Image (cartoon, grey):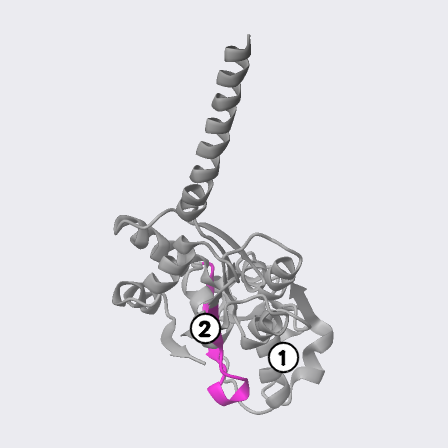
């Protein structure tokens, strides 16, 4: 009986010891969880697919408005990497000591455009005080929420500088993210919308009718950073996002590659 008890105890200790040695390995092989701005979906999906063909692990990617993702990370969501569509929400996480500051860099750039349904698209000259309200008529201007979502904030900044925000503010259909605004226009539920150039490029249901002057809004910058204590796979993916292979894919999708440390 005593021998059985001793053997059982040893077996239990061996099991615990084995489990203890396996946990770090499991953690190291865990796939990265990436929180990324909605406008990155097509490009980032393609980049991760390329990474996998070159031996990288799978990745879980959550797409939404940068504001939503930043708040989720602040609330403890298990993200390993954050790619925002503006500097403000990355600054927000840095201020709250949630990112690895040494990993932060400005990865991509984009342009802001005005779109219309493909079946009714007519060029619009985007100049100071251009008659946007008149063109809209009784219709809505689809854009991401200008109060918090980067695409909406860029859009509001541009329309304000161009002197037309006051005339269209009451006509804005504020969407939860830029892809939702894109959908409103492609479905014909809004005659015009403000989105990124890269969004318009992937939706055949819309056409670009005008491009906002670059000096009408803050530069559109997508910063990237690892979340503190991110798993090693996330660091490897972050490194791959800066390779020539990733650059080719991003540029093919219409992004400009910045790849600059702050």
In the drawing, does residue 42 fall left or right of residue 194? left
In the drawing, does residue 88 fall left or right of residue 39? right
Residue 179, picture quadrant:
bottom right
Identify the residue shown where x is 56% and y is 64%.
178
Q: Residues within 10 Å of mark 2 (few under 14, many from 20)?
A: few
Q: Specify whether residue 10 is painted magenta.
A: no
Give the distance between the C-alpha atoms of the residues marked 2 and 1, in whole angstroms: 32 Å
- Which of the two marks, 2 or 1, is nearer to us in this view? 2
Q: Residue furthest front?
A: 2
The magenta span reads 205-224
- Give whichever of discs 2 and 1 has the lower sequence position: 2
Q: Residue furthest top?
A: 1
- Badge count: 2
Identify the residue shown where x is 45% and y is 66%.
200
On the image, the x and y values in percent for residue 241 come to: 35, 64
Secondary structure, mark 2, is helix
Secondary structure, mark 1, is helix
**Which residue has dot 2 on it?**
102
On the image, the x and y values in percent for residue 118 come to: 47, 63
Q: Tell me the quarter of the image containing the C terminus.
A: bottom left
Residue 261, picture quadrant:
bottom left
**Which residue has dot 1 on it?**
156
Does the rendering let one see residue 179?
A: yes
């Amino acid at each position: 009986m005593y021998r059985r008890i001793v053997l059982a105890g040893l077996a239990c200790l061996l099991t615990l010891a084995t489990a203890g040695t396996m946990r770090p390995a499991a953690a190291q092989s865990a796939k990265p969880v990436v929180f990324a701005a909605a406008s990155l979906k097509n490009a980032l999906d393609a980049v991760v697919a390329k990474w996998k063909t070159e031996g990288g692990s799978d990745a879980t990617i959550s797409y939404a408005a940068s504001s939503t993702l930043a708040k989720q990370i602040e609330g403890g969501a298990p993200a390993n990497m954050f790619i925002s569509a503006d500097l403000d929400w990355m600054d927000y996480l840095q201020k709250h000591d949630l990112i690895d500051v040494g990993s932060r860099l400005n990865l991509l750039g984009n342009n802001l455009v005005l779109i219309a349904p493909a079946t009714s698209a007519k060029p619009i000259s985007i100049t100071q005080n251009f008659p946007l309200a008149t063109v809209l008529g009784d219709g809505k201007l689809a854009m991401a929420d200008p109060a918090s979502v980067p695409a909406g904030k860029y859009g509001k900044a541009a329309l304000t500088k161009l002197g037309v925000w006051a005339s269209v503010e009451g006509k804005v259909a504020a969407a939860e993210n830029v892809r939702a605004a894109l959908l409103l226009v492609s479905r014909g539920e809004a005659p015009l919308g403000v989105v990124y150039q890269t969004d318009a490029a992937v939706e055949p249901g819309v056409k670009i009718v005008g491009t906002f002057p670059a000096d009408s809004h803050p530069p559109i910058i997508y910063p990237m950073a690892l979340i503190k204590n991110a798993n090693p796979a996330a660091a490897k993916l972050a490194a791959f996002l800066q390779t020539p292979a990733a650059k080719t894919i991003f540029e093919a999708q219409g992004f400009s590659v910045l790849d600059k440390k702050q």
